[in-house]
Amino acid sequence: MMLDRKSASHHSERVVEVIAHETAQFIAREAGIESLITVIRAVPFAHGERVTVFVSVFPIEKSHAALAFLERQREALSNYLKNHTRLSPLPRVDFLLDNGEQSLPEGSVQ
């Protein structure tokens, strides 16, 4: 039984890695030049039915526009993932901002 959990955990980690990598490729191909959007990490939720992709945006002032762009491109990303991965079922991808350095108190060490 322990092996099954470990195997399922490894599978979940691999799915998240693939989604993070392919989402970064999609963003690099589709995003404009007004800002730099970088995938930081991805985290699974709801037993793998959803994945939250955390992104960093530079300049920070473009964060709202970048997140709005990603939300508008969700269906295109889903189609891209269907064509570039063998994931089935494909989890829903949500986006959150993770500009870590921006939220640290002054003088903090990461």
Image: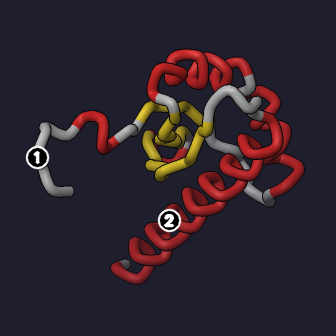
The residue carrying pointer 1 sits among few (fewer than 14), some (14 to 19) or many (20 or more) residues within 10 Å by Cα, namely few
Residue of label 1? 107
Foreground of the two, 53 or 97: 97
Q: Position of residue 104 (x, y in %)?
A: 20, 40
Q: Nearer the viewer, residue 86 or 31?
A: 31
Disc 2 marks a residue whose amino acid type is Glu
- Examine the rendered structure and indicate whether residue 65 appears above or below residue 92: above
- Residue 82, percent from left and from top: 83, 47
* Quarter containing the C terminus: bottom left
* Residue 102 in the figure: left or right of residue 50: left
Residue ID at (34%, 80%): 2
The residue to which callout 2 is attached is 13
- Residue 87, x across and y down, in percent: 73, 55
In the rendered view, would you say 70 is above or below 42?
above
Q: Which badge, 2 or 1, comes first in the chain's sequence?
A: 2
Q: Is residue 71 left or right of residue 49?
A: right
Q: Looking at the picture, does residue 41 appear above or below residue 62? A: below
Looking at the image, the residue that sits furthest to the right is: 83
Residue reaching furthest bottom? 3
Which quadrant holds the N terminus? Answer: bottom left
Q: Residue at x 48, y 40 (%)?
A: 56
Q: Dot 2: what SS?
A: helix
The Cα–Cα distance between marks 2 and 1, rounded to whole angstroms, is 33 Å
